Image (cartoon, coloured by chain):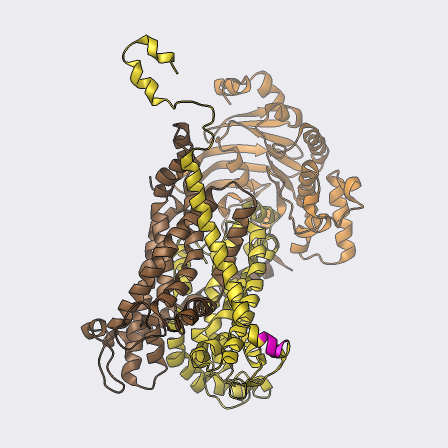
Chain colours: A brown, B orange, C yellow
Amino acid sequence: MSPAVRRLINTVVSALTLLAAALVICPLLLIFGFLLYRGLSALNVDFFLHLPKPVGEPGGGVANAIVGSLIMIGMATAVALPVGILGGAYLAESRDRRLPWILRFVADVMNGVPSIVFGIFAYTVAVIPMRRFSAFAGALALGLIMIPIVLRTTEEMVRLVPNSLREAGLGLGIPQWKVNLRIVIPAARAGIITGAMVSLARIAGETAPLLFTALGNRFWHQGLDQPIAALPLQIYAYAIAPYDDWHRQAWAGALVLITLVFLASLAARVATRGRTIAR
Amino acid sequence: MGDGIYVKGLRAWFGDTLVLKGVDLTVAPNAVTAIIGPSGCGKSTFIRCLNRMHETVPGARVAGQVLLNSEDLYAPGVDPVQVRRRIGMVFQKPNPFPTMSVFDNVAAGLRLGGIRRKARLQEEVERALRHAALWDEVKDDLDKSGVSLSGGQQQRLCIARALAVDPQILLMDEPCSALDPIATARIEELIHDLKKELTIAIVTHNMQQAARVSEWTGFFLLGELVEFGVTKEMFTTPHDRRTEDYITGRFG
Amino acid sequence: MSAGAATGSGTVDRVSLRPRAIAGTHRGLGDRVYRAVMLASVGLVLLAAAGLVAALVWESREALRAFGPRFLLSSQWDPVAGEFGALPFVYGTLLSSLLALVIAVPLSLGAAIFLAELAPAWIRPPVAFLIEMLAAVPSVVYGLWGIFVLVPWLRDWVQPALGRTLGFLPLFQGPPYGIGMLAAGVILAIMIVPYITSVSREVLLAVPGSQREAALGLGATRWEATRIAVLRYGRSGLIGAVLLGLGRALGETMAVTMVIGNRPEIAISLFAPGYTMASVLANEFTEATSDLYVSALVEIGLLLLLVTVLVNGLARLLVWSVGGPTRGARE
């Protein structure tokens, strides 16, 4: 093959990879564009403050869905965050050989389990014994999805803390546990928080595990052991229904969700910029 | 009859930092030219400018002339790929391709150049391995992975790989710094043989090595070529005070 | 302990700063409590994972007992008659995922090579960020876009065109509904591309720079250096990245449910509607009237769990073989 042909191949392949990269980010722009185009008009104060109107009547909002989502996310986070952070810190600090490997593997595999399977688990563990759908069951499913994400991102962030910080603490005669808790983990604080935010944005958008745990509700929930609305559930219900007005609200809800996700991702990027911990 | 490199006013930058401050130097044909100096003096940068490897680092720039015989390698329109084909390089840490066998490693450059016929490849690979004094040790194991060899053998494999494409010049960037003394000695022996047919430039932080293998030596300090001359003379009667200080170990 | 006491009043304070005794302070109480709490968290996570499998096996026992291996081979899904065969769902899951891979893999690998090797430095961070964002878009949003944008486009433009040009192939026969296997495959492809791209990019970045340099030094063009040094070196990691994408596609629920048509039939044509394991769970779980029905659905869930665990486990091992176990934490 002559040098000229090889140069040509080089140029063609480079162009193809550029094309591939452009095609890859295309959908994001298309989706965001459509959400803005269709959804912005339906975003008004009513949307955020009112309950859904009866079938066929235009107007109304998704206030109960927003509140429901917040409640379940809050419950899930309350348990998943401490467990995930402690587990992640363990992975980053431990010098054992087998247990960390097992935990890491299990967490990564859990990350790949379809979220609907967690819904089934919550169904068997919470819905069947309680004989009803509930916010509690929904939160259980969401919490389980959240744990492995927080765990791995915490591990990554704690690992980034320079060893010199640990050694400085140990050199002063401070016990290991205090060094970890009061020096190392706070140093990784920014990264851990953004990891938590990213996982929060992720479960905020989850629909499948809520389909038969929280079930959804067109009104305010009557208690945490009762069915409860959630924003992604509402979007789904509106999307597959035959009413135009509901479709518009679905777009609006999706716009809200994707904005949340965008902000969380942006914050994560900014906080871990340069992959160093500012101290 | 051999090929030489003539460097005129070579300057090099990493981003905005000027790391080579105008170097004039000759790499004499069919001889070994050693480049010595303390860490950070620019010797690796210098040698990487000779085969246009320096510019593969994002933000790196070069100015000046590097002539291979009478052709300026930095003239507009010159394809760096072709430059690197004619000027081979051996790196500090042996870097054979781990997913390829010994044979495929040596043949890699040949295949890139379009040679596909089995018979021809086998011929050239054997020639290169003999040239690199490695043939007898690997001739029954040509299918083994490139990384299954010892450190010294891997470096000779890399030399064979570079020699296979029949370069006019061979650049060596501290080729022995990762090797034990015995492997080092074998490579120095190899250099003695190679220079009969090839022009070699070698960067080394080991002054005794420079004294052993080279005819010419250039001493670099802080991006400048401080002194250049016949090796024997430079090590016995250096002209520049700084050269003398380095050679006598006052810094280094 | 009494060393400083003799030298004057100021040293009494200093002595009290020192720990009482050196011997026997190897692991203090604080250390043990901390370690216990950590291990409790670790135990909780492992327990949850084990509980997941156990609960699914337990709840599907009725269906397991009733149908055995027939469950996977029968295409009879008849809740009224109490006959449950999962073949249509397995078929639908496999076909839609395969189609997604066919579309996604060339695009993802191309984009990853672009980002890791060939792109100028200033372009990399924004593009990498956009790809990360794509991975974070919720499934239901993709589904929404799928229903209102992708499906009409397929129905009005793509499918008629495919029918005209390639209609002699059984793959592209049948009325252009828009909704169906093709829509599911396309939307899955869009959803898994960011995963494959970002993991592939990390794999490529993990290849040592000296490999690229060796190839360049031989006189290779940038693409040739990428081909013989980087891609070969990272081969197993790239396969792992593709498997990760596959794992994701297998379990994807909402977007697929919204565009696949939800008909439990096995058809060759990509224009035909289909049904996946995840979709049947999403649609029918709340409508399952009998215990056997629920049990059959849970068994499908168990199947889905096992398949994705296998694929993901294998994928992780392959990715770790290139860069080490701490890579790829953020997916």
Question: Which residue is more in the foreground, B169 or A254?
Answer: A254
Up the image or down, A170 lies above or below C10; here it is below
Up the image or down, A263 lies above or below C323; here it is below
Q: Overall secondary structure of the magenta stretch?
A: helix
Q: What is the residue that sits farthest to the top in this orientation?
A: C7
Say which residue appears at 45% left-offset and 49% top-offset: C40
Say which residue appears at 47% left-offset and 79% top-offset: C183
Is residue C196 at least partly visible in the picture? no
Give the extent of the magenta segment: C64-68
Where residue A222 appears, x then y in whole percent? 27, 72
| Total number of numbered discs in the rendering | 0
Q: Is residue C292 left or right of residue A191?
A: right
Q: In what quadrant of the picture does the N terminus of chain C appear?
A: top left
Say which residue appears at 70% left-offset and 51% top-offset: B104
Question: Which residue is more in the foreground, A188 or C124?
Answer: A188
**C230 is within the stretch colored magenta:** no
Up the image or down, B183 lies above or below A209; here it is above
Which quadrant would residue A116 be assigned to in this image? Answer: bottom left
Q: What is the residue that sits farthest to the left in this orientation?
A: A45
